[in-house]
């Protein structure tokens, strides 16, 4: 890892806000781990909750280098989700902020040695230090802040108007939790988090040291499916690397370059970093909202290795805006390279839909050699629109448990009109299994069984057994050319009057009418039919009624597949990856049904 890290840093492979701080921040996080190890004689369990990409990636690499258990978390989780997470993990260190005014009452923690620092501010009665230290000019306090004026810190001291804080190397949002004293008793101290700017400086007086590999590193990636409890799939550096190698071999590329607009805590975002880091490729990170609202000259997928002696910052310049250093791309200087690139970008269907609504972004997107599409099922109209604009789409199939994709349709096949998820990647094997556990033949629909070198070890906490295969709820089949095709989820299947209905088929028919912006089909309990097919949809305008939609789908679907119950809503509850939250969807449907019954 050290060799790859040196290459990644020395070749300016990371291109994002404040990427020039990447190496400094890694050293800073290293020191946090070293200090904890020296104080407690074991490696910490770390929650990584940094919102800024450069901080997230620096913390991730520091944790992996030290063989710590690291839990990737979503900064936008609410109190209920964080309560689940803390009950499950009981962390030692938090890097990032656990929501403002988030009080976890049942299983909370106290912050040891916390203090609040503001730029050019005074630290008054807020900094408790174990020992006294003499800080000289430009000394780094707690890996976070540079103190330009010399000062002497004594135990439980107060610093009044004595330091100037440089913003170039700050860890503004980290917490150090002293949970060691009560671990044997199975009790955890209390955690009260009210201020998102709270910090916990830990005085370090030496350079980073190598940490012995006393434990096996685990990387916990969150997965909540389409609703319900948060789970963490347990991965290792090896399982993530296996996914990268399979991707690299399948697409026959040496260096993988990626333009990332997905969250790094999610497997789809994290694996873009892993592909670039392991293969020495370039990684450009930009928030999707920034991309969506950008003008043509603000963004472009660039491969910088052809620049010769030119500094990459000649093209990826930085501009100060308040406290942020943003990337400003010179379109004119880089435009001539676009057609010669092998850059990957990964999107979820809802993101692709929004980009295809703007002509300048359609033109920009068409210049990518590969546009990976996954995270949620894509509908036929979206795929056809992408083909029309000659977007080199590569629909994928994968999940957190497999460290992203295990099957992908190559762009050339997509543009030729091929459907499905494509062939299985070299590091994985897929079998289709029947109801009795038997392996099914070509074109027979059954449950998908996955074996892969990238397969998760299981869910945290591990019970001691490492799973060798993954039997999932998805239904699909392999065709004559061994292309994987997904039918839908077995648990989503609706049985009405003894007949099986697959929601994906009904949703596709409804979308094909062109009358809805979004739709999801579910089955609601019915005393007579068992279940009744129910469509929850977002009409394109207020004049569209369900009778208009029904009239257009009657010729495409048999009668029992046509929804009996229709609910019009302003939007469907989807997460940032475009997945439907089915728990909330059922709540909407049941509430609407009860309201209608009450009116009757």
Image (cartoon, helix red, strand yellow):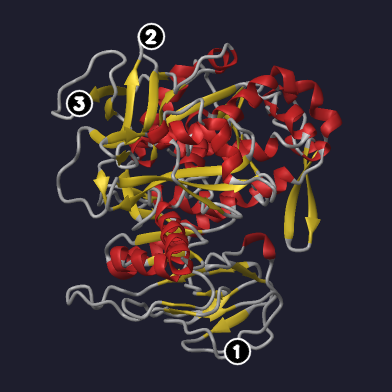
Total count of labels: 3
Q: What residue sits right under mark 1 in the picture?
A: 124
- Viewer-nearest of discs 1 and 3: 3
Q: Is residue 385 above or below residue 249?
A: below
Q: Residue at x 44, y 45 (%)?
A: 564
Which of the 4 quarters of the picture holds residue 170?
bottom right
1 or 3: tag closer to the N-terminus: 1
In terms of secondary structure, where does tag 2 sit?
Answer: loop
2 or 3: tag closer to the N-terminus: 3
Q: Position of residue 67 (x, y in %)?
A: 33, 49
Q: Is residue 348 visible?
A: no
Disc 1, disc 3: CB below 8 Å? no
Q: What residue sits right under mark 3 in the picture?
A: 434
Q: Is residue 77 left or right of residue 21?
A: left
Q: Position of residue 145 (x, y in %)?
A: 61, 68
Q: Position of residue 212 (x, y in %)?
A: 30, 51
How far apart are the two marked residues, 1 and 3, measured between alpha carbons?
68 Å
Q: Residue furthest top?
A: 480
Q: What residue sits right under mark 2 in the picture?
A: 481
């Amino acid at each position: 890892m050290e060799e790859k890290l040196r290459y990644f840093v020395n070749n300016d492979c990371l291109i994002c806000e404040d990427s020039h701080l990447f190496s400094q921040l890694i050293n800073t996080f290293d020191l946090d781990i070293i200090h904890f190890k020296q104080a407690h004689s074991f490696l910490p369990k770390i929650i990584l909750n940094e919102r800024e990409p450069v901080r997230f990636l620096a913390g991730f690499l520091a944790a992996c280098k030290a063989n710590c258990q690291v839990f990737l978390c979503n900064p936008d989780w609410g109190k209920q989700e964080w309560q689940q997470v803390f009950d499950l993990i009981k962390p030692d260190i938090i890097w990032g902020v656990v929501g403002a005014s988030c009080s976890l009452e049942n299983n909370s923690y106290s912050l040891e040695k916390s203090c609040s620092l503001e730029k050019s501010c005074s630290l008054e009665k807020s900094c408790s230090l174990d020992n006294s230290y003499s800080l000289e000019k430009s000394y780094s306090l707690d890996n976070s802040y540079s103190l330009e004026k010399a000062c002497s810190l004594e135990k439980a001291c107060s610093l009044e108007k004595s330091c100037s804080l440089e913003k170039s190397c700050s860890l503004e949002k980290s917490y150090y939790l002293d949970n060691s004293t009560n671990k044997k008793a199975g009790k955890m101290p209390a955690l009260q988090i009210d201020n998102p700017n709270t910090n916990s400086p830990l005085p370090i007086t030496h350079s980073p040291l190598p940490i012995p590999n006393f434990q096996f590193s685990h990387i916990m990636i969150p997965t909540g499916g389409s609703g319900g409890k948060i789970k963490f799939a347990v991965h290792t550096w090896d399982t993530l690397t296996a996914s990268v190698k399979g991707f690299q071999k399948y697409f026959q590329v040496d260096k993988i370059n990626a333009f990332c607009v997905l969250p790094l805590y999610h497997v789809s975002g994290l694996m873009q970093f892993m592909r670039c880091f392991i293969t020495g490729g370039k990684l450009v990170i930009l928030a999707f909202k920034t991309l969506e609202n950008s003008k043509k000259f603000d963004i472009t997928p660039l491969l910088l290795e052809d620049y010769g002696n030119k500094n990459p910052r000649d093209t990826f310049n930085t501009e100060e805006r308040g406290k942020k250093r943003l990337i400003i791309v010179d379109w004119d200087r880089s435009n001539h390279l676009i057609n010669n690139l092998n850059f990957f970008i990964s999107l979820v269907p809802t993101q692709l839909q929004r980009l295809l609504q703007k002509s300048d972004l359609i033109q920009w997107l068409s210049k990518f050699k590969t546009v990976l599409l996954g995270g949620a099922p894509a509908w036929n109209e979206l795929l056809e629109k992408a083909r029309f604009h000659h977007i080199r789409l590569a629909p994928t199939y994968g999940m957190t448990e497999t460290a992203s994709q295990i099957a992908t349709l190559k762009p050339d096949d997509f543009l030729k009109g091929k459907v499905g998820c494509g062939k299985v990647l070299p590091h994985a094997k897929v079998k289709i299994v029947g109801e009795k556990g038997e392996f099914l033949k070509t074109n027979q629909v059954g449950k998908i069984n996955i074996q892969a070198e990238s397969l998760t070890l299981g869910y945290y906490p591990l019970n001691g057994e490492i799973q060798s295969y993954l039997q999932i709820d998805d239904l699909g089949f392999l065709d004559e050319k061994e292309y994987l095709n997904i039918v839908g989820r077995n648990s989503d299947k609706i049985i009405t009057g003894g007949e099986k209905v697959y929601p994906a088929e009904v949703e596709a028919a409804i979308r094909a009418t062109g009358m809805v912006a979004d739709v999801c089909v579910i089955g609601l309990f019915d005393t007579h039919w068992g279940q009744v097919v129910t469509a929850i949809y977002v009409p394109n305008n207020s004049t569209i009624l369900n009778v208009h939609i029904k009239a257009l789908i009657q010729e495409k679907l048999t009668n029992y597949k046509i929804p009996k119950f229709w609910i019009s809503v302003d939007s469907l509850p989807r997460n940032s990856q475009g997945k439907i939250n089915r728990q909330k969807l059922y709540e909407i449907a049941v509430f609407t049904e009860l309201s209608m019954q009450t009116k009757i």
